Image (cartoon, rainbow, N blue to C red):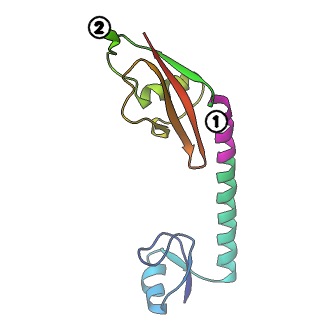
Amino acid sequence: MKVILLKDVKKQGKKDDIIDVSDGYANNYLIKNGLAVPYSKRSKEILDGEIKVREDTEAAKVAEYNEIKKKLENKELTFKVKVGKNDQVFGSISSKQISEKLKEMGYSIDKKCIKIEGAIASLGVTNVEIELHKKVKFIIKIVVTK
């Protein structure tokens, strides 16, 4: 029996896959537990429609993220920090602080999108990668001054 998976099923397939399984497994487990629906022309049309909508929303998100990328790509964020002897920085700059600074500028970027290894704890310029989407990545400069 052919079914369309509504959710990922271990050792069977991923969501939206069309698989061929035994009638008993399909009726007694997959369909009964809401993991799949029987394959038919109508269910295939519905699946194609849902995939098209998902692709369109994904494309809209990528376009929106590309606009943000164009605006921020060559920007520098400056942070003033307190320093001790020999220009040793007290504290550090974290992804949360970078996210808050971007919010002040009008860009709502989650701190999880900001890829820093550790925290920035030295004076100077550091390049930080921002990954808004797996297709949209860019570098922003963080300047730490006294």
Marker count (numbered): 2
Is 88 on the left or on the right of 106, as rendered?
left
Q: Is residue 17 magenta?
A: no
Is 50 on the left or on the right of 84, as rendered?
right
Q: Position of residue 52 (x, y in %)?
A: 69, 63
Who's the residue at 68% across and 51% down the image?
A: 59
Compared with 39, 16 (above or below) is above
Who's the residue at 69% across and 67% down the image?
A: 49
Who's the residue at 34% across and 16% down the image?
A: 89
Label 2 SS: helix
Q: Are marks 2 and 1 in contact (CB under 8 Å)?
A: no
Q: Position of residue 21 (x, y in %)?
A: 49, 87
- What's the distance in space between the residues labelled 2 and 1, CA to CA? 38 Å
Q: Position of residue 112 (x, y in %)?
A: 45, 39
Disc marking residue 69:
1
Q: Is residue 68 magenta?
A: yes
Query: Between tags 2 and 1, which lies in front?
Result: 2
Q: From the image, which quarter does the N terminus lie in?
A: bottom right
Specify the segment rendered in magenta: 62-72
Q: From the image, which quarter does the C terminus lie in?
A: top left
Most prominent secondary structure in the magenta stretch? helix
Q: In which quadrant of the rendered view does residue 54 lie?
A: bottom right
Q: Amino acid at mark 1?
A: Lys
| Mark positioned earlier in the residue sequence (2 or 1) | 1
| Residue 84 seen by the camera | no
Compared with 51, 18 (above or below) is below
Q: Position of residue 4 (x, y in %)?
A: 57, 77
Q: Amino acid at mark 2?
A: Lys
Q: How packed is label 1: few (under 14 Cα within 10 Å), some, or many (20 or more)?
A: some
Instruction: List the single residue furthest toward the left.
Output: 85
Q: How packed is label 2: few (under 14 Cα within 10 Å), some, or many (20 or more)?
A: few
Q: Which residue is mark 2?
A: 85
